[in-house]
Image (cartoon, coloured by chain):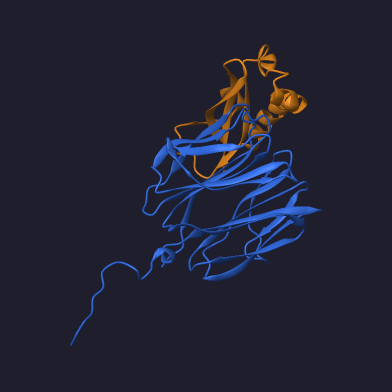
Chain colours: A orange, B blue
Amino acid sequence: MITIISKIELEGTDNLKYTDVGYTSEESVINQINEDYDLTLGKFLGENRTKLEIGEVSVSTFFATTDFVNEARATIEDASDLGLIQITDINQL
Amino acid sequence: MSAPVSVNSFSANPTPGNNFYQFSYNVASGTNRLLVIQLTMSNLRSYTGCTYNGVAMTQLHTTNRGGLSQRMAFFYLIDPPTGNNTLRINFSGSQWNPISIHARNFTGSGGVGNEGRTGGQSTPNTQSLTVSDDSMIMATACSINAISTIQIPQGTNRSFVTHNTNRQVGTGAISTGQSAGAYNIRTTSTFGSVTNDRVEILGLSSSANGDSGDFFMILE
């Protein structure tokens, strides 16, 4: 299985936008990306799900200090036709 | 004649944070193509449809599992466009809870056949599905507790992907081609109750019948 790396950023004023930016099979890259996600956007979403659902909190609050976050949790058997670059080092992102 | 060939499975567990989620997905060329997608998410929102390359997919079901506060669904598209296109899932509003997504495509398939859906029952949850010759069976399970096994048929563990949608989901389990008959599909969780949803993916022999076509009688 290949893991797809998605860039997550603010769309409009209150939504998320996902863009696939690469793929990897390096466990260290996957772990680094997801640890960063869990400590930042993942934490914000986890703490604010109910308020986000009812509009009491906007995700733009999070993106006021962050341009984007990556996540690497989508897997696919074959990424060769997706037109993505292979990421072997997190510094490529 | 032959079982379907499964191609290029995709699994993801994102928080959409929007009233849709979409991803690029490649459908292989070949004849008798079938694209399927299996979904589970919080029931605070509903599915309002799926499209592939802008073509509406057929809804097999959407099922509200009120006890688990989850909505599970299955969509499919016969003879989808081939190549790299966008698969899009639409919701009734912004979904801020994680969604479990599993997509795969097939060649050599006669489409989607029988299906069964059973809500949470004490583990193990064992249910029957009758299938035609050469069919494959896909199954998914949801529970408050971790999914332990998805057995298709009972006694044969199939690999599956685990997702967290604020509930535990096992998705993507699939059998090899089966002979015609009734099979028990078993889902288990570490504790408590677990759901059992199952779908028949038809092979090519299943779609043939004697109602139409050309017939020849040889007289000597």
Residue A43 seen in the current view:
no
| Image: A14 above or below B142 | above
Side of B36 where A46 appears, left or right? right
Q: Position of residue B126 (x, y in %)?
A: 70, 63
Residue B161: percent from left, percent from top: 64, 47
For residue B16, which quarter of the picture? top right
Q: Residue at x 60, y 26 (%)?
A: B18
Residue B53 image point, x, y percent: 42, 36
Question: Which of the pair A87/B84 is nearer the observer?
Answer: B84
Q: Is residue B145 left or right of residue A15?
A: right
Compared to residue B196, the image places residue B23 above or below, namely above
Q: Residue at x 69, y 14 (%)?
A: A61
Give the answer, above or below, for where B98 lies relative to B206: above
Report which quarter residue A14 is drawn in.
Answer: top right
Work out whether residue B57 can be spotted: yes
Q: Nearer the viewer, residue B19 or A63?
A: B19
- Identify the residue at image location x=46%, y=59%: B4
Asked which quadrant contains residue A87, the reply is: top right
**Viewed as shown, does residue B60 lie left or right of B144?**
left
| Of the pair B26 and B166, the residue shown nearer to us | B166
Looking at the rendered image, the quarter that the C terminus of chain B falls into is bottom left
View extreme (right): residue: B191
